[in-house]
């Protein structure tokens, strides 16, 4: 299992988010203000420091949290490649807002003195991403260590647990709220999985972030992006593809790797790319349609 081609190819929104989190965390760390990143019940309900809610999404409290958080965000770029930058932007906004609202509600109900300050960082997005990771990303390798069962997804869960319990209750509550937000998105509450931004908003991140290295597959029009977060439990795609034209170039390895990372069979991914003239998004649609028959 992998996140597809290395780097941020076809994942400009993730690239922008990772860069922003790293810069904000380092900036506040250098200035010795990391302890002011988190927010508390008093900040919201008594001082009305709503800006702390917004800031807490873009900066981690400590270096270990930054390392594990950036690693998880980097891997979860696979979802942006699956559903497109536009709909992934909606997923980020939905999971972040819903998670923050649930955190505020929980603090208002619990009023626990040990939760005086919650951990800062994009916990809502990270742990919301574990919902499609668990449901939609298939296990490709299983192995045993000291007779204990493991898979190629195990390290991701270990990294998530490390981040979840990094500050005990202060990080546990945002993580749980993130999982609930991801579940609500998966259940398509408020038709969240069908929402889309105007195209210029999603493309804005491409202009903001640094360019990726390596070959990039041409982007398909927004109307070709799958409407829902797809499920890739079935790895072998049935159905025959028409013979490619002789002028069609052999699909690049990074495009094949992107589709394989989504759970598709390598040979089916190659044939779909040939049929789609090496358009990754169009090939994804072809493979999904084949699975639905």
Image (cartoon, rainbow, N blue to C red):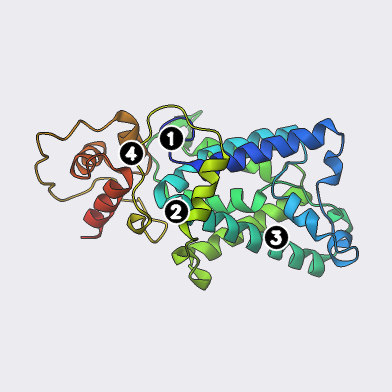
Q: Which mark is residue 135?
A: 2
- The earlier-in-sequence mark between 3 and 1 is 1
Res. 167 image quadrant: top right
- The earlier-in-sequence mark between 3 and 2 is 3
The residue sitting at 70% across, 65% down in the picture is 101
Q: Give the SS element for disc 2.
A: helix
Q: Which mark is residue 2?
A: 1
Closer-to-camera residue (279/132): 279
The span from disc 3 to disc 4 (Cα, nearest Å) is 34 Å
The span from disc 3 to disc 1 (Cα, nearest Å) is 30 Å
Q: Count the marks: how many?
A: 4
Q: Would residue 162 be visible to someone looking at this image?
A: no
Q: Are marks 3 and 2 in contact (CB under 8 Å)?
A: no
Dot 1 crowding, Cα within 10 Å, few <14, some 14–19, many 20+? some
Q: Would residue 45 be visible to someone looking at this image?
A: yes
The residue sitting at 90% across, 66% down in the picture is 46
Residue at the disc numbered 4: 260
- The earlier-in-sequence mark between 1 and 2 is 1
The span from disc 3 to disc 2 (Cα, nearest Å) is 23 Å
The span from disc 1 to disc 2 (Cα, nearest Å) is 16 Å
- The earlier-in-sequence mark between 2 and 4 is 2
Residue at the disc numbered 3: 100
Closer-to-camera residue (156/47): 47
Nearer to us of marks 3 and 2 is 3
């Amino acid at each position: 299992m992998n996140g597809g081609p290395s780097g941020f190819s076809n994942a400009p929104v993730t690239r922008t988010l990772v860069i922003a989190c790293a810069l904000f965390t380092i900036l506040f760390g250098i200035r010795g203000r990391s302890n002011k990143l988190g927010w508390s019940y008093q900040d919201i309900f008594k001082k009305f420091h709503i800006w702390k809610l917004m800031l807490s999404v873009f900066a981690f409290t400590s270096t270990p949290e930054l390392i594990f958080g950036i690693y998880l965000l980097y891997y979860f770029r696979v979802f942006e490649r699956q559903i497109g930058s536009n709909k992934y932007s909606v997923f980020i906004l939905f999971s972040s807002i819903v998670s923050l609202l649930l955190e505020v509600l929980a603090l208002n109900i619990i009023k626990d003195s040990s939760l005086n300050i919650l951990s800062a960082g994009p916990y809502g997005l990270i742990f919301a991403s574990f919902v499609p990771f668990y449901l939609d990303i298939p296990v490709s390798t299983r192995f045993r260590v000291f007779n204990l069962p493991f898979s190629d997804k195990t390290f991701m869960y270990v990294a998530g647990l490390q981040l979840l319990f990094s500050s005990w209750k202060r990080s546990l509550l945002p993580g749980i709220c993130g999982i609930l937000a991801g579940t609500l998105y998966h259940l398509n509450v408020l038709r969240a999985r069908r929402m889309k931004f105007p195209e210029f908003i999603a493309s804005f991140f491409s202009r903001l972030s640094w360019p990726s290295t390596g070959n990039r597959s041409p982007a398909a029009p927004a109307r070709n992006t799958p409407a829902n977060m797809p499920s890739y439990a079935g790895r072998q795609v049935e159905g025959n593809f028409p013979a490619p034209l002789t002028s069609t170039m052999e699909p690049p390895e990074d495009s094949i790797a992107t589709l394989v990372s989504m759970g598709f069979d390598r040979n089916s991914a190659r044939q779909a790319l040939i049929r789609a003239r090496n358009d990754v998004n169009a090939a994804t649609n072809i493979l999904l349609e084949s699975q639905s028959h």
